[in-house]
Amino acid sequence: MKAETVPGSTGKASPVLPDLRGYFGEFGGRFVSETLMAALYELEHAFRSGWKDPAFKKTFLGMLSNYSGRPTPLYPALSLSKEAGGARIWLKREDLNHTGAHKITNAVGQGLLAARMGKRRLIAETGAGQHGVATATVAARLGFECEIYMGSEDVRRQALNVFRMKLLGAKVNPVELGGRTLKDAISEALRDWSRTVGETHYLLGTAFGPHPFPLMVRTFQSIIGKEARRQFLKAEGVLPDALVACVGGGSNAIGLFHPFIADTKVRMFGVEAGGRSLSPGEHAARFSGGSVGVLQGTRTYVLQNGDGQIENTHSVSAGLDYSAVGPELAYYRETGRIAFDSVGDEEALEAFRTLSRTEGIIPALESSHAIAYALRLAKTMRADQNILVNLSGRGDKDVMEVSRILEEKGEIL
């Protein structure tokens, strides 16, 4: 296998993954119907040729700069760090992207690829609604028709983002099947794509699904880690001691982590949704309660029972409420390069309030899981050490849901 060395790394080579079949070790691949195989080959060709085309990359990076607002700042969260005690906490402010999350970066890249392939229509799944908003935004900007699939439970939880998508011209399709959350939205989007593959691009929102989606989304989102690496070196002259990111499908996590993979002194922590408990159906922590299986086009860790039936999931965060995890993250978990842990609903809600009070930054509930873990981790580290957290999205979309939860608990702000 070919290898590459990241400049400024420890000098140890990291493997170039995935392989030509789309596998990260034993994880990944393409498990789809014949109808979609041709579309995936077309997409892989468009992506690989586009990424080698200087004109495409110039358009992509230019749109990120003058439309979505990159680079996003690296922010030293001094008050949050004081609250935690121990290590200093830094925030990569992906919440300051246009549309309010890291999702716009991948949406811009895939939207430009869809135009390159001559498609006229974009479809997408969404959980917390941020990817749906990003897709609707890019569709409006580039002139595509747009339909979004969203579990009806998430439609209820994320009413603000549903309205934003409609305002941007997208049709939002509530999905009433299964648990009525992200898994079910993806299934419906795949069915749509199978029927309309000639005119439609499925703009998958995370580093999941059949090859080339995990590779493509990671490539687009790696701009997060590249910026953060450069910014931290400029600010401190060294690399951070630890990186922390929440993990649903995994796009914000692998986007931050990948440019640091060869820097073996930098520890990496992925944070899953611990939900109400780690009992089946009460969480979305695939590495705590899952096993290797195939779901929605890829082989990875899946929450499933002994008969291979997909288990229900739960999280206070709609964006983390998913039954499987991206195959590249599964690979790095197996090799030990990335450690994974979980944060429960209550701890995430407390972190949501803590960051709001200490820094005047209201985080998304997804990002609150990463903040909670960083607070936990900081207490175990020295005051001269540094934790870099990917603040993947802002919390406007979650304010009313958090208000409802606190009211039900009898808590008054």
Image (tube, grey):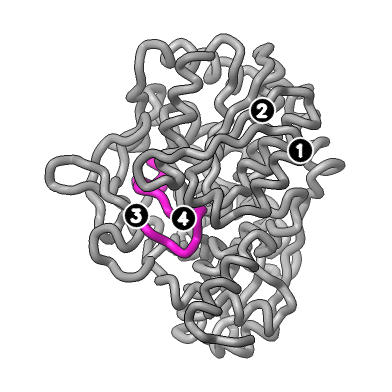
Mark 4–mark 1 CB contact (< 8 Å): no
Binning the other alpha carbons within 10 Å of mark 1 as few (below 14), some (14 to 19) or many (20 upward) gives some
Reading the image, the residue beneath label 1 is 168
Reading the image, the residue beneath label 3 is 313
Compared to residue 350, the image places residue 52 above or below, namely above
Reading the image, the residue beneath label 4 is 320
Q: Amino acid at mark 3?
A: Thr
Binning the other alpha carbons within 10 Å of mark 4 as few (below 14), some (14 to 19) or many (20 upward) gives many
Compared to residue 353, the image places residue 98 above or below, namely above
Q: In the structure shown, which secondary structural element does the residue marked by tag 4 occupy?
A: helix
Binning the other alpha carbons within 10 Å of mark 3 as few (below 14), some (14 to 19) or many (20 upward) gives many
Reading the image, the residue beneath label 2 is 146
Q: In the structure shown, which secondary structural element does the residue marked by tag 3 occupy?
A: loop
In the rendered image, residue 13, in percent from the top left (x then y), is placed at 45, 45
Residue appearing at x 71%, y 54% in the figure: 100
Q: Amino acid at mark 1?
A: Leu
**Nearer mark to the viewer, of 4 and 2:** 2
User: Which range of residues does the magenta coloring cover?
Assistant: 313-330
Q: For this view, does 362 lie left or right of residue 386? A: right
The image quadrant of residue 177 is: top left
Residue 374 in sight from this viewpoint: no
Q: Main secondary structure of the magenta part?
A: loop
Residue appearing at x 49%, y 46% in the figure: 152
Q: Quadrant of the N terminus?
A: top left
The answer to which of marks 4 and 1 sits earlier in the sequence is 1
